[in-house]
Amino acid sequence: MIPAPPVNVGALAPTLVILGAAVLVLLLDLFPPREDKTHLAVVSLIGVVGALMIALTRWGRDQRGFRDMVVLDNFALFVDVIICYAVALVILLSMDYLRRAGVQTGEYYALVLFSASGMMLMASANDLIVVFLGLELMSLCLYVLAGLFKQRLDSGEASMKYFLLGAFASSFMLYGIALTYGATGSTSFSRIVGAATGPDRPVIFLVGLALMLVGFGFKISAAPFHMWAPDVYQGAPTSVTTLIATGSKAAAFAALIRLLIGTLRGAQPDWGPLMWGLAVVTMTLGNVVAIAQSNLKRMLAYSSIAHVGYMMVGLVAGGAAGAGAILYYLFAYTFTTVGTFGVLSLCARAGEEAVEVEEYAGLGRRHPLLAGTLTLFLLSLIGIPPLAGFVGKFYLFGAAVQSGFLWLAVIGVLNSAIAAYYYLRVVVYMYMREPDAAGATLSPSFAGGVALAVAAAGIVILGVMPAPFAELAQSAVATLVR
Amino acid sequence: MTVGILTVVTFLPAAAALVLLFVPRRQETLLRAGALLVTVATFAVSVPLYLRFDARSADYQFEEYARWMPNLGVGYHVGIDGISLLLVLLTTLITPVALASAWRAIDDRVKEFVVTLLILETGMIGVFVSLDLFLFYVFWEAMLIPMYFIIGVWGGGRRIYAAVKFVLYTMVGSVLMLVAILALYYQHAAAMGTYTFDLPTVVRWVIPPGTGQTLMFLAFALAFAIKVPMFPFHTWLPDAHVEAPTAGSVILAGVLLKMGTYGFLRFCLPLFPDASLAFGPLVFALAIIGIIYGAWVSTVQPDIKKLVAYSSVSHLGFVMLGLFTLTSQGVIGGVLQMVSHGLSTGALFLLVGMIYERRHTRLISEFGGLWAVIPAFSTLFLISVLSSVGLPGLNGFVGEFLILVGAFQVNRTLAAFATSGIIFAAVYLLWMYQRVIFGEVTHAENRTLRDLNAREWALMLPIMVFIVWIGVYPTAFTGKMEATVDALIAQVQSKASVAIDGHGPSRPMVLLR
């Protein structure tokens, strides 16, 4: 007889709000109007903003529930805020984007919200089982969303590839969890600590940890588990790509930080060198291969692999400095990435999405404001001060130098110099090449404009006045590394 | 915090750029006039810096401090000493001149151009006034992007190649400097117990000599050496100079290159004295190679602009030589030569731009006999050429002479080699001048060239005034920096000897793992 665990709904409050909004969207979808789904987007948006508000009001008050399987501490709240921003901006971008694509469906918004609740569950997970639950909830929705454009072959390919490889990675993860359970007798983060560190740690635990890292590596698209990313980013609807690039990474990194830095920092000699190598391979591969891409979504896929590599530098650095730096970077990266993909989603050519870099030739003449905004996001991705991307890199590499990983920081900054080349190539096309008569043009969208304005304001504020946010990130990880 | 004069000088152009963003792009004259007015106003605001600067003091003056990122020890700390004073004034003088030179030359996307140039000015002044390593790095990197746009959007035929090369070269150097800044920050904190990026605070700490100091020196030095540019990191410069529009070339030569030499003076020498002394011979060697190589390559250039571009490699070699002599004359000469080079090379680029606007070619072989056609142009060109050659009575002579005096005290052979650079400068500049200006008019198109108009006179005049002023009465400028330079040299020597004698803190290095 297993006694039912005590229920503490408060520990799941933001997640439940999102889930409630998702269910409401499903219900409302049954009623007219059939054609226009704007009202569902508005309901979803209200749900996400509500969750964001709740997350903000809970700051500083730790909540635990379900026998410590779920923790709503500052760390989870910070990640929840990032996820809420990502999801809200994605919804804003989706409204007109889906209408233009002719794929306005109610279940789109429901799936986005369900996947968001999975992400938030991962951020609060204090137990490997909950991590897995959140991961699957998030991933299954994203698999479906990637194939939203049913008529398009590449969308189907993206969905299929993502699903097959994702399922494979999930099984690695599950096997790793099983082995860890076998080695330590528990799946709870609080209890695997003791059995996992020290000289007499079981070898089977190390195997389990390695398998879990494979699963995580897939979700964050770290090399060499990144193969899916370019195809999925390219084929999936741009709004879904944005969600995959931002929210799902934030969630997976949150779980990774809680597991590696929060729980297993005693075992850093075991996973540290592995992560060092993975970080170097990931950022170098991402940046070098991105140079060769002419499809912007594909280029951004490789660039996001590189950014994951930078964040893994924060994992290697470890401690409060490393974890805080990753949180800050995730925040900055979310705004920047949403903005970049957002501009792409607003650009069309002959009714099709404009994704080839040549199509952006002369955009600076045709749409100065749009081109200027995209330039701002690209400069932040390069890491030019005083924009958010620079401060994020500064914290990350600062944490690495502080922990003595000088050469890792050197490799990281050299990588960001390589990255300047391919990001600036887009700028070259927009401003320095003659306009192509059939080039991309703007499809006006009020909601999309709002999303871009929020994202642009975000990267400027995070870049010019980073101190308050960095302090929040530090206090978010303070409980974690205590 | 009250807003001080330095903050106004630094941010006035950027603030004006934000305002100009809202001016409709069709109002081209309004945009040009507004931007020119702002840069002139910036110069006017910066003049009191010179007048109220206390030359007897080696301390930073007009200091302002505000907390920015207190958790990291990053502050908005600005101030100037005798060295940065002249460079700030050079920047505020050159920018309106560059803008005025583009009045007719830039007729495409005027709005973007003036906004970019104003942001660039803020970045450049920011580099010279920052007294916080983080703040310095922010300006140093941020200023890259406007320059990239100026070369890439308004440049010549191979502008994209030149712009990307410029950014990538500079970027590789500066990101390594970022790591070095971080390493310095944490080592300073480990040794002294305070986390701060504040330059005056960090400089007080004597970094123990060893691998750590050498690596940090090399990272800083690479960033600056690329910017100067020192041989063999100079290959971006001819491309950038030649492809940039006149206004861009003037700013590149006038101000941007000085950021490299300024960086050596402000950061490398006082922060890493032992490594600076250890690498001194290498710097001398590269400087001498740069002086002679730059001069020789200039001699054979068929294109006037390229000739002037390579002459920068040679002239900046002199500056580096002077700074690393670590003698009072050498350093003062080096700083003065920075200003002089900015003025004379800026003037040469302006004149090359004017002749290019008339003839749409810059090849020496396309000209000849211009004296008879456009005497005013030829006269100003002569003054600029002679200033660049180093004719006594004009500005170039003073700096080079002081540098050579400094070099002779350190090593006679070096100085002898360096002196040959002045002779070569006379060769390539005067030979070029002779082919362009004297002789018969060989091309019919040149017969109808019009001479300088009022705008061109107006923008050349300030530069000519300073060329003569510095040449005739250099004390007005060297006097402002003597105390600063002497204090700097004393600081470098005392820090180096403290560390070598072993009296300094001798903590084990924790830099490398």
Image (cartoon, coloured by chain):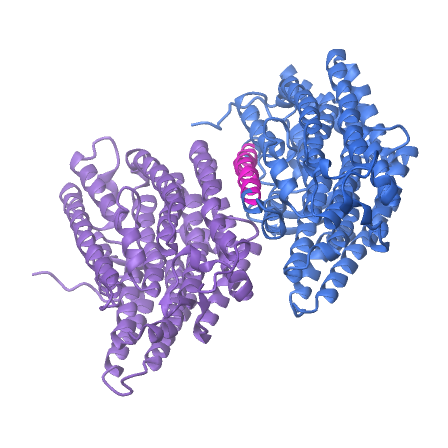
Chain colours: A purple, B blue
Left or right position of B14 against A301? right
* Residue at horizontal 82 percent and vertical 24 percent from the top: B402
Q: Does residue B306 belong to the magenta stretch?
A: no
Res A270 quadrant in image: top left
Place of residue A201 in the rendered image (x, y in percent of width and height, measured from the top left)? 21, 34
Query: Is B500 in front, or is B329?
Result: B329
Task: Please say whether residue A80 is visible from this viewpoint.
Answer: yes
Task: Please say whether residue A64 is visible from this viewpoint.
Answer: no
Q: Tell me the quarter of the image containing the N terminus of chain A.
A: bottom left
Q: Residue furthest top?
A: B413
Place of residue A131 in the rendered image (x, y in percent of width and height, measured from the top left)? 24, 55
Q: Does residue B170 belong to the magenta stretch?
A: yes
Q: Give the dominant element type of the magenta stretch: helix, strand or loop.
A: helix
Left or right position of B183 against A167? right
Question: Looking at the picture, does residue B36 appear above or below residue A391?
Answer: below
* Residue at horizontal 83 percent and vertical 33 percent from the top: B439
Which residues are the magenta region? B162-187
Place of residue B305 in the rendered image (x, y in percent of width and height, measured from the top left)? 70, 38
Left or right position of B413 against A53? right
